[in-house]
Image (spheres, rainbow, N blue to C red):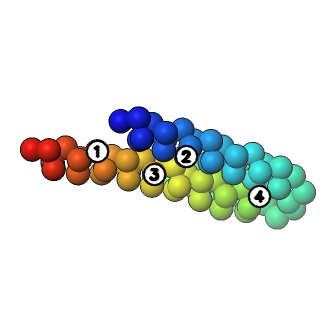
Amino acid sequence: MMHNLNKLFFNIFYNSSLFIILLIGIQNSSSKVKINLLINETIRLPISFIIGTSFISGSIFGSLFKLSTTKNTVQSERD
């Protein structure tokens, strides 16, 4: 349990650091686009911000998925 908690905190710290670096890095970005969602479209955002946030969110969800599958595997081995 403590090992999973350490992994979770490390993942949050790592992805937060990446997000801060991303925000600093896109300050002078000039190419902006709108994203068409199912209902509306977003405001004009830099392309690097869109790509960076999708990478970071994928990293977060991937690590959470790995933690949940590890927990299920350990419980099934105990039974």
First of labels 2, 4 by sequence position:
2
Q: What number is the disc on residue 46? A: 4
Q: Amino acid at mark 3?
A: Ser
In the picture, measured across the screen, residue 55 lies left or right of residue 17, that is left
Inter-mark Cα distance, 3 to 2: 7 Å
Q: Residue at x 54, y 38 (%)?
A: 9
Q: Which residue is mark 3?
A: 63
First of labels 2, 1 by sequence position:
2
Query: Closer to us: mark 4 or mark 1?
Result: 1
Asked if residue 69 can be seen in this view, the reply is yes
Inter-mark Cα distance, 1 to 3: 12 Å
Q: Amino acid at mark 2?
A: Asn
Instruction: Bin the neighbour count of mark 4 within 10 Å (Cα to Cα): few under 14, some 14-19, many 20 and up.
Output: some
Work out whether residue 37 or residue 28 is closer to the camera in this orientation and state it: 28
Q: Are marks 3 and 2 in contact (CB under 8 Å)?
A: yes
Q: What number is the disc on residue 11? A: 2
Q: Which residue is mark 1?
A: 71
Q: Amino acid at mark 4?
A: Pro
